[in-house]
Image (tube, grey):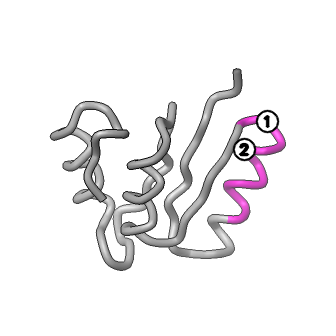
Amino acid sequence: SNMKILVVEDEKDLNEVICKRLKLENYSVDSTLDGQSALDYLAMTDYDVIVLDIMLPQVNGLEILERLRDHGNTRSCPP
């Protein structure tokens, strides 16, 4: 099956460019523009790769990374 990738980037144009390129390479891609939505996605789905911006609205990238590391696997990550 395809690698599943989550793109977390609040700059809309950059987010779209990254997603478009990944989809051209046949990756399965979800994307979000803010940290809280990213946590919601991570609570529901296991991703192979996360393209994660640091400076994000609501919850920043470093906080998301800390939660992922604390919880081991993404699906146990609390929203």
Q: CA distance from mark 2 to mark 1?
A: 5 Å
Residue 50 lies, with reference to residue 78, above or below; the image says above
Q: Is residue 23 magenta?
A: yes
Image position of 77 (left or right of 1): left
- Farthest residue to the right: give it: 24
Task: Name the dominant secondary structure of the magenta segment.
Answer: helix
What's under tag 1, amino acid-wise? Glu
Neighbourhood count class around disc 1 (C-alpha, 10 Å): few under 14, some 14–19, many 20 upward: few
Image position of 45 (left or right of 22): left
What's under tag 2, amino acid-wise? Leu
Q: Secondary structure at mark 1?
A: loop
Q: What residue did someone put label 1 on? A: 25
Q: Nearer the viewer, residue 46 or 20?
A: 46
* Magenta residue span: 16-27
Residue at 58 percent across and 41 percent down: it is 5
Q: What residue did someone put label 2 on? A: 22
